[in-house]
Image (spheres, rainbow, N blue to C red):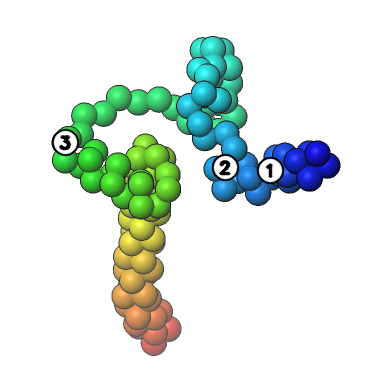
């Protein structure tokens, strides 16, 4: 009897929750009311949107989500974040290249002004 109690106690650990042994069964799921859902979205900085995507694209995200053990919508959110970050880096890199290209011209103009 002590062994049985110990087994149950060990099962209800943070590791069991993190690994999904506990809490992922549909019987534990329930919808939250709109007010609480809205508060959660506000805290997480999320906004619901509506978007139309090709069915094949959604299916592809679902397959990838299964591979990475996450839902397809969070996976889409992550992909969009990575795309935006990559574009910002590209824009910053292009701006730096333009600045570097303009710097020799500025040095030439300064030398001409000093010589005059």
Residue 21's tag is: 2
Residue 66 in picture, x, y percent from top left: 35, 47
| Residue 30 visible in the shown view | yes
Q: Which residue is mark 3?
A: 54
* Earlier sequence position, callout 2 versus callout 3: 2
| Residue 9 visible in the shown view | no
User: Disc 2 on helix, strand or loop?
Assistant: loop
Position of the N terminus, as image quadrant, is top right
Q: Nearer the viewer, residue 22 or 62?
A: 22
Residue at 35% in and 80% down? 104
Residue at 51% in and 12% down? 34
Q: Is residue 8 left or right of residue 18?
A: right
Q: Is residue 5 left or right of residue 81?
A: right
Looking at the picture, does residue 6 appear above or below residue 104? Answer: above
What whole-number distance in Å separates the C-alpha atoms at marks 2 and 1?
8 Å
- Picture quadrant where residue 105 is located: bottom left
Residue 11's tag is: 1
Residue 4 in picture, x, y percent from top left: 75, 41
Looking at the picture, does residue 88 appear above or below residue 27? Answer: below
Residue 5 in picture, x, y percent from top left: 78, 39
Q: Farthest front residue? A: 1
């Amino acid at each position: 009897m002590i062994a049985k109690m110990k087994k149950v106690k060990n099962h209800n650990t943070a590791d069991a929750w993190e690994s999904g042994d506990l809490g992922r069964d549909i019987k534990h799921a329930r919808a939250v009311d709109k007010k609480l859902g809205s508060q959660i979205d506000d805290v997480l900085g999320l906004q619901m949107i509506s978007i139309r995507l090709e069915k094949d694209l959604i299916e592809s995200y679902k397959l990838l989500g299964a591979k990475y053990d996450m839902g397809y919508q969070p996976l889409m959110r992550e992909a969009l974040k990575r795309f935006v970050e990559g574009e910002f880096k590209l824009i910053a890199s292009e701006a730096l290249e333009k600045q570097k290209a303009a710097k020799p011209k500025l040095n030439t103009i300064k030398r001409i002004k000093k010589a005059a």
